[in-house]
Amino acid sequence: AQSVAQPEDQVNVAEGNPLTVKCTYSVSGNPYLFWYVQYPNRGLQFLLKYITGDNLVKGSYGFEAEFNKSQTSFHLKKPSALVSDSALYFCAVRDFFTGGGNKLTFGTGTQLKVEL
Amino acid sequence: DAGVIQSPRHEVTEMGQEVTLRCKPISGHNSLFWYRQTMMRGLELLIYFNNNVPIDDSGMPEDRFSAKMPNASFSTLKIQPSEPRDSAVYFCASSSLVGGLYTGELFFGEGSRLTVL
């Protein structure tokens, strides 16, 4: 089965500094990878995805992610963090199944805290 | 577009009572998912539907849980009888085809926070 791992429960970064939230994946075949963000007491929101093409994927709110096949990683990055980026971030992988579909398996989540 | 609508947003009930959570997906979406989120277990996929048909319910914890999708615009998740360990936030999400292909993007509702005393 496809799976993703987020090795860090929490990441702390100062506002204005670059941030990285790590994700590694384990899939058979070509991976479909995603990042979602969850603000307190809200549902998850889609940030970006990698299906094919350029290894650097750009998404919402200035976030980007780098797909690295040799390291089986899909780390989320932002050049300059904002306090408002503080939230819970989930990496996800699409499971393939007969008939197609969007069954996603999520990682355990990483709490990002951006401080002044 | 109103997005995915879930009700109730909060529910507090006593052990043994029946709980029904409701979801209205985004109009035109043909896949619907129920997820459960807890601190201990994170996000778990309970069941998903394609074109109103349940495709995979292997994530449903036990027979106390059931889900239905009688039409394209409505789904329910029922717990009967409820137990304290069912306390969690339950999310509904929907998705659609774009150009004949699934995009992989799920649209989540705001969730239903269930507390079973």
Image (cartoon, grey):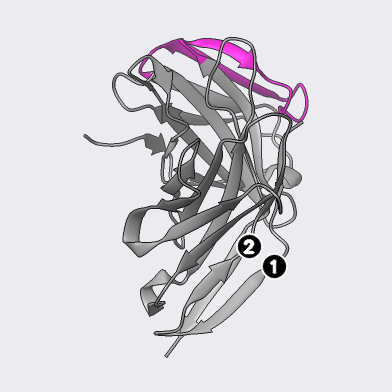
| Residue that label 2 marks | A22
Q: Residues within 10 Å of mark 2 (few under 14, many from 20)?
A: many
The quarter of the picture where residue B34 lies is top right
Say which chain tag 1 marks: A
Residue B117 position in % (x across, y down): 68, 50
What residue did someone put label 1 on?
Answer: A8
Q: Position of residue A75 (x, y in %)?
A: 58, 59
Disc 1 element = loop
Residue B117 is left or right of residue A83, and the answer is right
Q: Residue furthest bottom?
A: A116
> Is residue B11 shown to the viewer in this render?
no
Q: Vertically, is B111 above or below B68?
A: below
Q: Amino acid at mark 2?
A: Lys
Q: Amino acid at mark 1?
A: Glu
- Image height of B109 relative to A55, above or below: above
Instruction: Check the residue under mark 2 and report the chain it is in.
Output: A
